Image (spheres, rainbow, N blue to C red):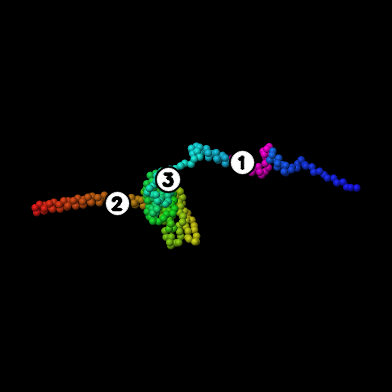
Amino acid sequence: MARKSFKKDSVLDEHEIDESSYDASFVLDPAKLFDELPQPFRLIDKTVNFIFDKAWEAIKELELRANELGLGGKLPVFDCAEEMQDFCQATLMCTSLDGKFVFLVAKNGIIYALDAETSCAVAYNDELQGIKVETLSAGHLDENKHLVCVLMENGTAATFALSGSNLHLVRVFNEDFGVKGSVTNYIDVSFDGNYLAVGWRIPLKSSWLEIYKIPKEFWCNEINVIEEKMRQDQQEASIKGEEETPKVASDSLENDSSDSEVISNFVHQKKAIM
């Protein structure tokens, strides 16, 4: 007697889902695109939408500002106001923090301070003449004083102070570099003039950076003393010049009178001979 085998047909439970058909129906059914995503995808979706919304708000705000300023998305074009014929061979240039002065280094190493409006030189310093300057920076020292820092190719650096019509040499860094063997390879001053950074290097050994607190009050007092001494010297020189002028005039009058006497004597002698 043959045994009967009973094969149970596979019945798809209503809770079971065919993955392939589910994916197909999810893509093909537009209504399922609006279904709420499960975690953590819902959090990711909210985060991405938040980022895009913030970016779009920032873009719209920038466009509104551009329209208010009248830029219209176009960059401004600046023309050359005036060509400085006397400083065509300048190698370095920078401006003061307030924009009133322009500092530049000529090819021969002379440092000039120019008025930004008139392009006229108000002060210069030729103590570095003949030395190539590699970098130039400027900072604010006082209400009417500005600090200028230069780095030279011979491994030294210097700071200058502009005060009125004078450009004073304040300090030289690494002046005896040949003895120590170190080289100054960087110098810069903060915009407010409170700090000074100087970089040092010993070839094939080490390098380091030093930050100095600028003694503003001390330097300003020293500059004021120097300028007061210069004014006194100028006054004394002008007084001496005024005193020498009448003396020269009297000497010329005496010379003229002596010349007239010589001429009159010569005329009388000539008449006597005739």
Which residue is rendered at x = 59% and y = 40% of the image?
53
Range covered by the magenta-colored residues: 30-53
**Which label belongs to residue 49?**
1
Q: Is residue 169 visible?
A: no
The amino acid sitting under disc 2 is: Ala
Given the image, on which type of amino acid does mark 1 rest? Asn
The alpha-carbon separation of the residues under discs 1 and 2 comes to 80 Å
Q: Is residue 256 above or below residue 63?
A: below
Left or right: residue 48 compared with residue 232: right
Q: Are marks 2 and 3 in contact (CB under 8 Å)?
A: no
Foreground mark, 1 or 2, reads 1
Foreground disc of the pair 3, 1: 1
Where is residue 123 drawn, in percent x and y?
A: 37, 49
Instruction: Report how far apart the C-alphas of labels 2 and 3 lie in the structure.
Output: 35 Å
Answer with mark 2 or mark 3, whichever residue precedes in sequence.
3
> Which of the numbered marks, if any, corresponds to residue 237?
2
Above or below, 16 relative to 205: above
Please give the name of the residue rendered at 75% of the width and 41% of the height, measured from the top-left corner.
15
**Residue ID at (48%, 41%):** 75
Marker disc for residue 31: none
Q: Residue under circle 3?
A: 99
